[in-house]
Image (spheres, rainbow, N blue to C red):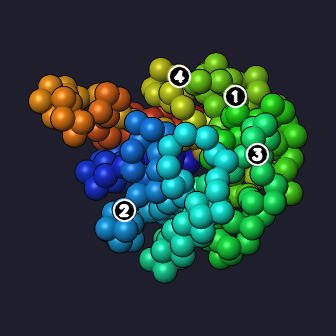
Amino acid sequence: MKLEVCVDNIAGLNAAIAGGADRIELCCCLAMGGLTPSMGLIELAKNAPVPVYVMIRPRGGNFVFSPQEVDQMKREIDVVRNTNLSGVVLGASQSDDTLDHNLLEMLIDHASGLGVTLHRAIDLAPDLIEATHLAVDLGFERILSSGGALKAVDGLENLAAMHRAAAGRLSVMPGSGVNPQTLRPILQAADFTEVHAGCGRPYTLNPRLLGFGFEDVGMAQTDECCVRSLKDILDENTKVD
């Protein structure tokens, strides 16, 4: 089984690799759910010994994007391709939270040659099974989802149903709140082939930096030991299977 770890800085990238991550989701601003990282971080990530998928999300908030934001997303996809990284992570919704079929089709076409993951915009969709079928039809490689819940461990019934609906045509990858305590029940819910985790360890914020707005509540550092613990559990589960 594969472990994907999301990181938002170079220290996190190094910690995830040292801990045994099989794939990296590269972002900035994980406290906001992840945004497109800087070009500098993308450049550094090309030296990673594991596949790196780059978040394509121009801002926080909803997933309804303006034409200018779409143009920005396409340019960011071009940067990823030109850097020779493995893939991108993206999503887009309509105002009713259903997936935006036309825009996603355009973005996937623009990302031709790259792997493409559908991110947790799907968790807002009113019908997760319908959204899963659409993701299959669009050609996504995988779906990152918490099953519509805040944490994956609370959305296991939906995640298992999505896994069945995908029927091996794409991977449903549980994510959100995945840690050594929640991983085992997640693995028991369905025959998932990969999981996604942040492995973030909160650190003590500097009150002065916080006051100036240079730090934000929710910031965390990627914990190499947590990554290794998750990888050990996954390897153990693979041996049992």
User: Would you name the residue on which mark 3 appears?
Assistant: 94
Q: Residues within 10 Å of mark 2 (few under 14, many from 20)?
A: some
> Could you tell which of marks 1 and 3 lies nearer the N-terminus?
3
Residue 61 horizontal/vertical position (percent): 55, 40
Q: Is residue 24 left or right of residue 212?
A: right
Real-space Cα distance between discs 1 and 4?
17 Å
> Could you tell which of marks 3 and 4 lies nearer the N-terminus?
3
Between 216 and 146, which is closer to the camera in this rendering? 216
Q: Is residue 209 left or right of residue 24?
A: left
User: Would you name the residue on which mark 2 appears?
Assistant: 38
User: Would you name the residue on which mark 4 appears?
Assistant: 182
Q: Is residue 232 left or right of residue 112?
A: left
Q: Residues within 10 Å of mark 1 (few under 14, many from 20)?
A: many
> Could you tell which of marks 1 and 4 lies nearer the N-terminus?
1
Mark 3 vs mark 4: give the one in front. Answer: 3
User: Would you name the residue on which mark 1 appears?
Assistant: 148
Q: Is residue 230 above or below residue 60?
A: above
> Could you tell which of marks 1 and 2 lies nearer the N-terminus?
2
> Could you tell which of marks 2 and 3 lies nearer the N-terminus?
2
Which residue is pictured at 51% across the width and 68% down the height? 76
Between 59 and 86, which is closer to the camera in this rendering? 59
**Mark 2: secondary structure:** loop
Q: Residue furthest bottom?
A: 82
Which residue is pictured at 68% across the width and 73% down the height? 110
Real-space Cα distance between discs 4 and 2?
32 Å
Residue 84 visible in the snapshot? no
Q: Residues within 10 Å of mark 4 (few under 14, many from 20)?
A: some
**Mark 3: secondary structure:** loop
